[in-house]
Amino acid sequence: MRFKFFGTDVHIGFLFSAVVMLLMILDKSYTAVFALMAAVMHEFAHLSCFLYFGQTPKKVDFNALGMRISRGQDTKLSLGQEAVAALAGPLINIFLAVLTVATPKVEWASRATAINLSLAIFNLLPVFELDGGRAIYYIMCMKFQEKTASRVLTVFSVVTLFLLYLLGFLVLIRSKYNFTLIAATVYLTILTVTKRF
């Protein structure tokens, strides 16, 4: 499915729709629904920042691996605006977590809070392909050369990924079956390596 949103092409792929439908059918706790809403709000916050700063992204693509905002080659924001746009996603998730904590005690509130906080914390990690890494990179570029900022963030990324692998193995050993963190770290490692080299 394709449509326009404030001049941006939005493409929702078949595999994305199929994965969402499958999760909704199999997940009776509606955790997948909350996770999807948190992820959509996260991307919407990034998109809103770009539009607010006067830059219309070229495309928003929803596929089986998630959501990605593609920007045109002529898209140019200041370093500060780039940092703000990168942090907008995690900040909206933190805001939503605070809202759900303040909600009267209902069954779904704690799940929604946990999902939004998890998404925010994960995306704030100092890894190149995450919002936290991008924000650190742009902030460092304000003080240092791009090459220096890139080298420092590479070190941050390697150390963070190493710690995530350790934590993932600990979780796997203690839970005896939960390999989610290891799978996410492998995915992040692949993204980082393919983007940097």
Image (cartoon, grey):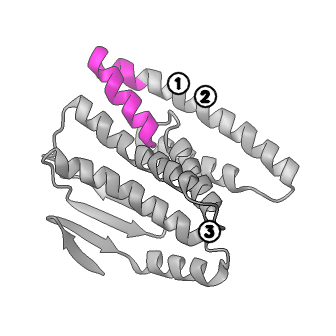
Local crowd size for mark 1, using a 10 Å CA cut-off: few (<14), some (14–19), many (≥20): few
**Disc 1: which residue:** 155
Q: Is residue 92 visible?
A: yes
- N-terminal of the pair, mark 2 or mark 3, is 3
Query: Residue 100's mark?
Result: none
**Residue occupying the point 77% across, 57% down:** 178
**Residue occupying the point 38% across, 40% down:** 87
For this rendering, which residue is in front, 8 or 185? 8
173 to the left or right of 154:
right
Residue stretch rendered in magenta on the structure = 129-150
Local crowd size for mark 2, using a 10 Å CA cut-off: few (<14), some (14–19), many (≥20): some
Q: Is residue 119 visible?
A: no
**Residue occupying the point 53% across, 51% down:** 97
Residue 114: x %, y % from top left: 62, 53
- Quadrant where the C terminus sits is top left
Q: Kindly report which numbered mark, 1 or 3, lies closer to the viewer in this rendering.
A: 3
- Quadrant where the N terminus sits is bottom left
Circles 2, 1 touching at the beta carbon (< 8 Å): yes
**Disc 3: which residue:** 31
- N-terminal of the pair, mark 1 or mark 3, is 3
Relative to 121, say whether 36 is above or below. Answer: below
Relative to 81, say whether 28 is above or below. Answer: below
Query: Residue 159's mark?
Result: 2
Magenta stretch: residue 144 in it? Answer: yes
Q: Kindly report which numbered mark, 2 or 3, lies closer to the viewer in this rendering.
A: 3
Helix, strand or loop status at disc 1: helix
| Amino acid carrying mark 1 in the image | Val
Relative to 20, say whether 88 is above or below. Answer: above
Alpha-carbon span between mark 2 and mark 1: 6 Å
